[in-house]
Amino acid sequence: MCDSFALHHYIYDIAEPRFADNLAFLSDMLAMTDYLDRPVR
């Protein structure tokens, strides 16, 4: 999943601090931290 988020980070040219903050906030809020390292098909 991290690869997908990194791709969106690159495509939409999101600033690194904002990207990191949003990823941390949303993964915590949605309880996705266990799934971030899993590959996406």
Image: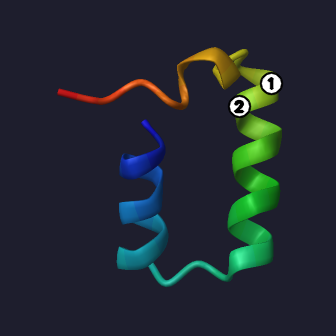
- Residue 37 in picture, x, y percent from top left: 50, 30
Q: Residue 39 has which mark?
A: none
Q: Residue at x 55, y 30 (%)?
A: 36
**Disc 1 and disc 2 in contact, CB within 8 angstroms:** yes
Quarter of the view holding residue 10: bottom left
Q: Is residue 20 left or right of residue 11?
A: right
**In the image, what residue type sits under mark 2?**
Ser
- Residue 14 in picture, x, y percent from top left: 58, 78
Q: Is residue 30 left or right of residue 41?
A: right
Q: Residue 27 has which mark?
A: 2
- Residue 20 in picture, x, y percent from top left: 75, 60
> In the rendered image of this protein, does residue 5 appear above or below residue 38?
below
Which element type, helix, strand or loop, lies under badge 1?
A: helix
Rendered-image quadrant of the N terminus: top left
Query: Label 2: how many residues lie within 10 Å, few (<14), some (14-19) or many (20+)?
Result: some
Q: Is residue 2 left or right of residue 16?
A: left
Q: Nearer the viewer, residue 37 or 13?
A: 37
> In the rendered image of this protein, does residue 24 appear above or below residue 14?
above
Q: Residue 29 has which mark?
A: 1
